[in-house]
Amino acid sequence: MPSSEFYLSSDDAWSQLVSVAEADRDARILDQFAEDPDRISRLSVEAAGLFIDLSKQSWTSRGIAAALNLARAQKVEAARDAMFAGEAINSTERRAVLHPALRASKGLRFNAMGEPVSEGVEAQRASLKSFVDDVREGRLCGTTGKPFRAVVHIGIGGSDLGPRVVWEGLRPRLPEFLVRFVANIDPADRQEALAGLDPETTLVIIVSKTFTTLETLANAKAVREWLEAGLPSGADLTPHIIGVTADPKKAEAFGCSRTFSFADWVGGRFSLWSPVSLSCAIGLGWDVFEGLLQGAEAMDRHFVEAPLERNAPVLMALAQIYNVDGLGRTARSVAPYAYVLRRLPAYLQQLEMESNGKRVTRDGQPIDRMTCPVIFGEVGSNGQHAFFQQLHQGPEVVPTEFIVVRQTHDDGPEQQLWANALAQSRALMIGKSSFEAWQEMVASGLSEEEASRLAPHKTFPGNRPSTSVVVDRVTPQALGALLALYEHKTFVEGVIWDINSFDQWGVELGKTMTRSVMSAASGGDEILDPSTVALLGRLAPST
Ligand code: F6P
């Protein structure tokens, strides 16, 4: 039975959340376990093989209820169903958003704005698989007849970060195929990626949804020159150059021998399930890539089927909104405790901040509350020796997400690593009073006077919230589930904030201005502000 609060209006649900959070601001997280004996079972969820514990979040029982009421008032379930039904939920670009169709089991049927897409997806998956197998088994060779041994993946943003997380997360320690990534326009990135590679055995995959991105095209041209210089004079370069894009004509015009396309209903930062991950599929093998898709599909099923109060992406989104809008916490740190997940914070920065770093509603009205927090992070335990000082003792409360991996390598569980993660989340919650700190010092032989002097420095306020996401091993299935978990969490936040999470107009102005600065640097007559003129004078003195 829906509660009577099911019928709260959006405004009332927001007011309720904000007032409950404010009233319970000083509630101690630790006390909540005694107040609500069901807290652990209510706030820990098994989803697609992951275990997610949200019991160390700041919310009290009524805070959780208010957050769930907000999800209902904002019609999260209807919005989710609209996404899976292929409605044009990307309202500013009038597009469907259907990345789940890319990882759906054979036979399932999706429509994008009424058009059936699944047969096309399945056909493309089959042709990708045969391409991958042909490259891996040496049936497709370079221009001099040698089999490929390395792949250079050129792309940036969504055409880079997802595949990079996948490759780093799953790659064999001694890969049969090298996969190198080039994203930055700084030639140093490209030089490092190409170092030691033989053009005769290197396949270059240019990944760009638009095939217009400055960095990617500059790198693609430079790598094409590298191929030209390293292959016999007059040789056909095209067998070495593959395109992945939503605009195949542009890729063909560039000189790609083969192009794998994807539809406009696949957003760049949601595209790793598409041919955008071709490099990974070659480097890891098709079965591994399929495992990744299966894990994501399992998370899709959980997202679609679980009720809101047991739904992992929904609960994670609500915990963030409670922190951001209820308690004014505008940053979040992410600490994956597995070396192979070290790129996850960078991936999440794009996924969440490019999706939800916005300040107008879907119909263009100003949003009068905070939206996406600043996201930062570092692999555990390295982060503990860097920014964790501020997490424990800084004046601002920064909620933290721990990705706790039980077994990070083949030799068995890595207890030291996961014990660190558990200890950190516990320490953030429990803290240490100044009296405890004082007592410890006196017990260890310090004078009372010296202990009093040091006690403020050794006090931990505690009551700092965290979420733990437990992963047994970083298998293809687990990684797929983890990445899909974050995709859906980001989607739910967008729905609750009433944001279109699928456009990114905010990156455009800088791109245009780069063109005018470059023009000014080469003597053009752009009118620039005094600061930019001064900087230009320092960087390009001849202008
Ligand atoms: O500049 C941001 C962005 O548009 C991202 O949204 C996108 O993932 C990235 O650039 C790369 O774009 P493309 O795949 O079209 O090269």
Image (cartoon, rainbow, N blue to C red):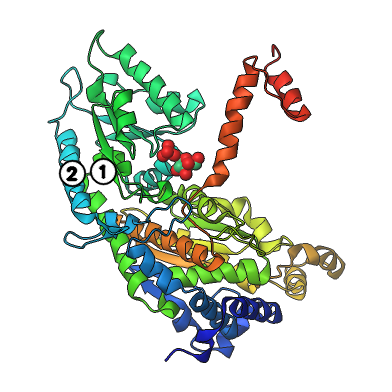
Q: Quadrant of ligand 1?
A: top left
Rendered image quadrant of residue 192: top left
Residue found farthest to the top:
233
Q: Quadrant of the C terminus?
A: top right
- Name the residue nearer the viewer: 441 or 470: 470
Residue found farthest to the left:
139
Rendered image quadrant of residue 438: bottom right
The x, y position of residue 400, in whole percent, is 57, 62
Instruction: Specify whether residue 14 is in view.
Output: yes
**Residue 55 horizontal side relative to residue 429, left or right:** left
What residue would you read off at disc 2? 129
Question: Residue at point 60% right, 51% down?
Answer: 385
What residue would you read off at disc 1? 281
Marks 1 and 2 close (CB-CB < 8 Å): yes
Question: Residue at point 33% right, 40% down?
Answer: 246
- State the separation of the CA atoms marked 1 and 2: 8 Å
- Name the residue nearer the viewer: 261 or 401: 261
The x, y position of residue 21, in whole percent, is 65, 77
**Residue 454 horizontal side relative to residue 418, left or right:** right
